[in-house]
Amino acid sequence: MEEKNVIQALAALAQPVRLQVFRALVVAGPTGLTPGVLVEQLGVPSTSLSFHLKELTHANLVSQERDGRNLIYRAVFEQMNALLGYLTANCCQGEACLVDSSTACEC
């Protein structure tokens, strides 16, 4: 993962509502969520939610798919895992870390 993409992803997540939206999509897994469900779950106005989803999509942390009349948003797990990998690439000066490597999401 390139540094500019890391900065863009971290900047997108560095806002409380966007972090909540992303975490909700991670919990939803590959099924994803519609904006209506996100509005209900998070109590965010729909106009505000669309702005935050656009920012997360632009950072490639969230994907959007049309299913009939609905939009389905999903976390991009590959990007999330790449970001986590970048942040921990040289953890512990190359020594084995105490964290189990099975924490990467396989969704």
Image (tube, rainbow, N blue to C red):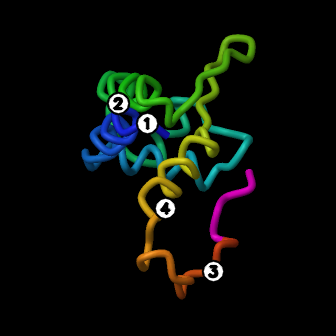
Q: Earlier in the sequence, mark 1 or mark 3?
A: 1
Q: Is residue 26 magenta?
A: no
Q: Which residue is mark 1?
A: 2
Q: Earlier in the sequence, mark 4 or mark 3?
A: 4
Q: Can you give x and y, in whole percent of width and height, for residue 106 in the image?
A: 74, 56
Judge whether residue 105 is colored magenta: yes
The residue labelled by disc 4 is 89
Location of residue 93 by image quarter = bottom left
42 with respect to 70 (left or right)? left
**Observer-nearest of 104 and 51:** 104
Query: Which mark is first along the chain, 2 or 1?
Result: 1
Residue at mark 1 to residue at mark 3: CA–CA distance: 24 Å
Q: Residue at x 49, y 40 (%)?
A: 1
Q: Amino acid at mark 1?
A: Glu
The residues bearing labels 1 and 2 have C-alpha atoms spaced at a distance of: 23 Å
Q: Residues within 10 Å of mark 3 (few under 14, many from 20)?
A: few
Residue depth check, mark 2 versus mark 3: number of the one nearer the observer: 3
Q: Position of residue 46 (x, y in %)?
A: 37, 26
- Residue at (27% x, 49% y) in the render: 16
Say which residue label 2 marks. Answer: 52
Viewer-nearest of discs 2 and 4: 4
Residue occupying the point 38% across, 41% down = 6
| 52 lies above or below 32 | above
**Cα distance, mark 4 to mark 1?**
13 Å
Callout in the foreground (1, 3): 1
Q: Amino acid at mark 2?
A: His
Q: Residue furthest front?
A: 94
- Location of mark 3 (residue): 100
Magenta residue span:
103-107
